[in-house]
Amino acid sequence: MDMTTRLSGEFGLAERLKALLLTVLRMLLWLVILYPTGSPAGPLPGTSSDGGSYLLAPKKESTIHLPSRLSLLEAMSVTIEHHPQYRQMVHTAQANKEIIGEALSNYMPHLSAGAGYNYETGNFVITPGIPAFFIDQLTSVPNSNQTYNFYEASFNLTQTIFTFGQRITQVRQAKYAYKSSRDQARWTLVNLLASVETAYDTLAQNLLLVEAAKKTVEDYRAQLQVAQAEYQIGMAAKFDVLNARVNLSNAQLNLITARNNVSTARVALNNAMGIESSVSYTVDTDLSYVPFRADYQKLIAQALRNRPDLSSAVNQKKADLQNERYYESTYMPSIGMTGSYTYASMFFPLTYNWSVGATISIPIFSGFLTVHQERQAQKTTLAARDAEENVRVGIVASIRQDIYNLNTAMERIRTTQDLLSQAKESLRLAAGQYQVGVGSAVALTQAEADLAAARAQVVQAVYGYKIARATLIRDSGLDPLTEAKRRKNREEQGK
C-alpha cells in the first residue's frame, strides 16, 4: 500500500466517522423535539389540579415523631410522608414513567461494540459449494496442530427508519399509562386522607364519650351517696340505695367500654396513617363544626372534572386505544438501516472492513397471532370504556347518597341538641321533686339516664356530620388536605 492509498483510506474513515456522528446528533435533536424536558403527563403524583395546596409526594423514610396532642393536619402530613400504600403507588407511577423513555429509545440509533480473540488451528474444512477441482488439491494438505492468533474488533449500528406507526403508538401508550398510574396514586392519597380524617374524628368522638361516661359515673356516685345518707336517717328506702348502686355499676361498665373504644380508635388511626406506634397521644376534641355547602349540581360537575380515579380510567382507555392501533400497525412493514465497521487479522496492524445496508421486514403469516392480538386489544379498549362509564355512574350515585347523609346528620345535630336541653330540664325537675319528697327514685334515675344518653347522642351527631362531610369531600374530588386547612383558617378567624 503506497502513501497515497493509505491517506485516501484514512480520509475516507474520517468522513465515515463524521457522517456517523452527524446521524447520532440528528437523532438526539429529533428526540428532544419529540419528548421535551419536563413531565410529559402533567403534574407529579400527588399534586392538586385545582390551584390550591398540593398533596406532597412521599419523602424518604424517616423517624416518626408524634406529638402528645396530634392535630388533623399533622395526622395527614404523617400519612403523606409515611403511608406505605401511597409510597407504593407513587413508585409504581415513577416506574411507568420510565417506560416512556423505553419507548422513545426506538427512535434512537443503537450502537454496539465488541472485541474478540481466538487461539485456533487453521485446517481447512470442506463445505458444500466448493468446486470439485479444488477438493483434490485441498484434501492433499494434511491436517496440522499449528495454531494462530486471531484478533477482531467491531462497531455495529442499527437504526429503524419507519414503522408505519408502531413506535409512536408505543410512546403514546406509555404516556397515557403513566398518566393513569399517576392519577391512581393521587386517588389513593385522597382515599387515605379521607380515611385518616374519619379515624381522627372517630377517636375524638370516643374521647368525648369517655368524658360523658365519666360525668355519668360522677352523677350516679353522687346519687348513691345521697341515697345512703337519706336511708340512714329514714328518708329513703333500701330500694333507693340498691337502685343507685346498680346505676353506678352500669355507668362504670359503660365507661370501661368507652375507654376500650378509645384504644381501638387510636389503633385504627395509626393504621390509617400507615404507621406502627405505641405512643399514647390525644387529638383535638371540639363539638363546633364548619358547615359544608352541598350544591348537588356543582359537586357533580366538580367531581367529573377533578376525580383522579375518573381521570385514571380515561387515560387507561386512551392507553388501550393506542395499544389497539399498535397491533393494527404490525400488519405493515418496517424499514431500517444497518452499518458495521470491523478490524480483524491474525496479526497487527488489523485490517478494517465496513458495510452499510438497508433492511425491510414484511410480516406475511404468523399463525394468526397478529389477528388475535388485535382483537384482544379491541376488547380491552371496550372494557376500558365500560370501566370509565362505571366510574361516572358511581360518582353520581355516591355524591347523591353523601348529600343525603350530610343533610340527615345536620338534622340529627339539631334534634339531639334539643333533646339535650330537654333532658337537662327533665333532670332538674325530677331532682327537685325527689328532694321535696314528691318524686320517685325511678323517675330520677330515668332522667339521669336520659341526660347521659342525650350527651352521647350530641357527640355522635356532631362527629357523624364531620365524618359524612369527609366522605362527601372525597367523593367530590376535592383535596382533603386543602379543605382541612381552609376549615382551620375559618375556625381561627372565627375565634
Image (spheres, rainbow, N blue to C red):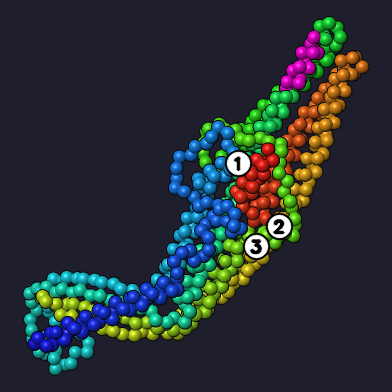
Q: Is residue 71 above or below residue 442?
A: below
* Amino acid type for the residue under numbered disc 1: Leu
**Secondary structure found at label 1:** helix
In the image, is residue 264 part of the stretch drawn in magenta?
Answer: no
Residue at numbered disc 3: 305
Q: Dot 1 corresponds to which residue?
A: 72
Pointer 2 or 3: first along the chain: 2
- Would you say residue 227 sits in the magenta stretch? yes
Q: Looking at the image, which residue is at 63% across and 60% down?
A: 306
The residue under label 3 is which amino acid type? Arg
The answer to whether 440 is drawn above or below residue 376 in the figure is above
Q: Earlier in the sequence, mark 1 or mark 2?
A: 1
Viewer can see residue 266: yes
Residue 484 x %, y %: 63, 46
Q: Is 327 on the left or on the right of 207, as rendered?
A: left
Q: CA distance from mark 1 to mark 3?
A: 27 Å
Secondary structure of residue under mark 3: helix
Between disc 1 and disc 3, whose residue precedes?
1
User: Dot 2 corresponds to which residue?
Assistant: 299
Residue type for callout 2? Leu
**Would residue 435 appear left or right of 297 to someone viewing this image?**
right
Nearest the viewer among 42 and 267 is 42
Picture coordinates of residue 324, whole percent (x, y): 54, 75
Point out residue 492 in the picture as x, y percentages from the top left corner.
65, 40
Whole-number angstrom distance, CA of label 2 to CA of label 3: 10 Å
Q: Residue at x 37, y 82 (%)?
A: 336
Q: Quadrant of residue 457?
A: top right
| Picture quarter with the N terminus | bottom left
Neighbour class for label 2 at 10 Å: few (<14), some, many (≥20)? many
Residue interval drawn in magenta = 217-229
